[in-house]
Amino acid sequence: MTPNDPASAQAAADRASEIAQQRRVAFERLRERTDELELLISGISLLSLIALPGWLFDRWIYAELHYEGTRAVVLTVTYQFASGLSYAMASAFLLHLAVRAYWVGLIGLKATFPGGIRWSHLRNSGPIARDYYRRTVVDLDNAIDAADRVASVIFALVSLVVLSVIWIAITMALLFGVTILLSEIFRLPDWVANAVFYTYMGALIALGGLIALFDLLPERLRRRTAPARPPAAWRTALVERLMRVLGLFAPQRLVLPVQLSLQTNLSGRAFFFGFSTMVMITTVVSVVPLTLARQFAPFASYDYLAEEQVGLRSAYYENLRGEHDRLLRLPLIPADTTADSQLRLFLPYLPRRDNPPLRTAACAPDTPPREGDPGCLARLWQVSLDGRPVAIADFLAAERRDLGMRGLQGYVSLSGLAPGRHELRVTWNPEQLPSAAHREGKQEEHRIMFWFAPPYQLDLEQPAPAATP
């Protein structure tokens, strides 16, 4: 039997058909289980993703105040990517579970009522409405297929967005990690990291633009002006090289099977809308918790007690600070009332706020550092008690692990104060540095009220002597 023998060709064709049939049967059996796997993955993932943004927020709050410049930006962007991706995936999985629940309900109806809708028993509608429903409402079989298709598309879209965002995040993390390491070794300025980021994004946009310029655009023009013919060899080689380079920025072997399957089987607008919505949620929604965490009550109705009227804020008192005060790094005293003769005052050191004006003013750290010496930081603060200046030179450099901060800590003498309310005024004032530093920060003034209640009774004032007649 020769290779060109018709009997041999027929046997090969039959064998190929048998293999295809076996693969189809195996695929159908696997397809019967994917619905269960989708529900299992969506349910477990949803439970985990609901708690993940809060955990990430706690870790970010603790870490971000220790850094400035590129490291602070990388930390914040990493949190926003991870938190936004968690919100996007949780929303998509919740929608997926809702569609699958609808699908399960339709299957139950189909099993219970095999005949589907019994139009003759629809007695609460007139003939016009009944005819309209007949033309517009799909039967149970089509509804089950449509719900199954929508759920599968949502699940695949989640996989596509997750793979794309995670890959981009990993490449950017590696890129910035190397940049930060080189910046530390060679003392490079912060604008180097910004240049690296814009170069990275520019390279992505340029590669996509060049591929469209040498591949898509000539094809569109050719359809209008010339008959079909293969592209030139040089253009094919150039576009393929560009696509190989683009493959370094995205895992094409993982992403393209999902992307192209969705893109070629859905309408262009539906795919673009779904993918863009997921990406938008990933990149934008994480900013909302940060914005809301810094506000007391967004869109509140405090018409008769405005922000400017508030005279006592819990964020200034260690014993009153709550969960919503974590992003407010302010001067701190122990409590709103004190009976001690010394009042502890902590002035936080925030590298992102304090380093730029000090660096611009050419204020160098102590070399070698001296234990307890506040150094240049003391030049940024002014403190007064009831209008009387307090000496910052007496403050010590402190590390408060209970607060997760470093700063200056001093003890303000309350000797000679009468019981009652007093005001501690603390000012972060870069304007007292050389004039070159003024543009690096804006003055911050904090008015901290406290009540002095000593544990002893003061003598009453002697009454004034009666006037002689």
Image (cartoon, helix red, strand yellow):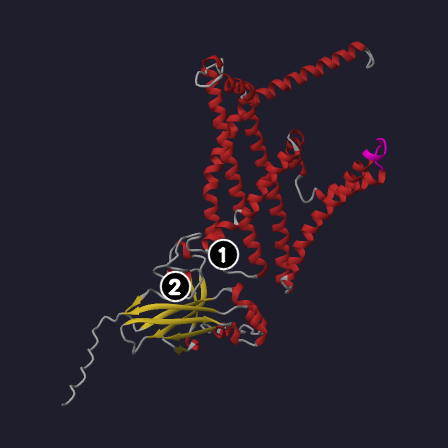
What's under tag 1, amino acid-wise? Ala
The residue that label 1 is drawn on is 63
Q: Position of residue 463 (x, y in %)?
A: 18, 82
Q: Is residue 356 left or right of residue 192?
A: left
Task: Specify the farthest residue to the top.
Answer: 7
What's under tag 2, amino acid-wise? Gln
Looking at the rendered image, the disc whose residue lies closer to the viewer, 2 or 1, is: 2
* Region rendered in magenta: 223-232
Q: Is residue 223 left or right of residue 343?
A: right
Q: Position of residue 296 (x, y in %)?
A: 42, 55
Q: Quadrant of residue 458?
A: bottom left
Residue found 25% across the figure and 71% down from its top: 454
Is residue 114 at all visible to an observer of this figure? no
Q: Main secondary structure of the magenta part?
A: loop
Q: Position of residue 75 (x, y in %)?
A: 55, 54
* Residue 227 within the magenta-colored segment of the rendering: yes
Q: Position of residue 320 (x, y in %)?
A: 35, 59
Residue found 15% across the figure and 86% down from its top: 466
Tell which circle, 2 or 1, labels the residue nearer the N-terminal end.
1
Which quadrant is the N terminus positioned in? Answer: top right
Crowdedness near tag 1: few (<14), some (14–19) or many (≥20) residues, C-alpha within 10 Å = some
- Above or below residue 168? Residue 23 is above
The residue that label 2 is drawn on is 309
